[in-house]
Amino acid sequence: MAYKISDACVACGACVDVCPVEAIAEGDIYVINPDICIDCGACASECPSGAISPA
């Protein structure tokens, strides 16, 4: 199961640096590509706004 980023995202970019498979892309808020995400949870633990959770 991939993770997802909610509207609580403040676009700080902390999640991008810790993703081992580069599944996170920048947009208005950051977005996780579910086809690439390996469900490691590294991004969720790094997110300061708690915007990332399992999909």
Image (tube, rainbow, N blue to C red):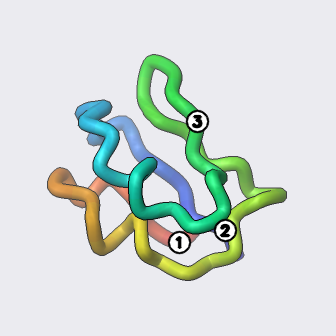
Q: Which residue is mark 2?
A: 2
Question: Which residue is at 41% across, 45% downward?
Answer: 6
Q: Residues within 10 Å of mark 2 (few under 14, many from 20)?
A: some
Point out which mark residue 25 bears.
3
Q: Residue furthest right?
A: 35
Q: Which residue is mark 1?
A: 54
Question: Which residue is at 63% across, 53% downward?
Answer: 22
Which of the 4 image quadrants contains residue 38?
bottom right
For marks 1 and 3, the one nearer the N-term is 3
Point out which mark residue 21 bears.
none
In the picture, which quadrant includes the N terminus?
bottom right
Q: Which callout, 2 or 3, points to the residue nearer the camera?
A: 3
Label 1 is placed on what type of residue? Pro
Label 3 is placed on what type of residue? Ala
Secondary structure category for the residue under label 1? strand
Does 14 appear above or below 42?
above
In the picture, which quadrant includes the C terminus?
bottom right
Question: Which residue is at 65% across, 52% downward?
Answer: 23
Does 1 appear above or below 33?
below
Q: Position of residue 39 (x, y in %)?
A: 62, 77
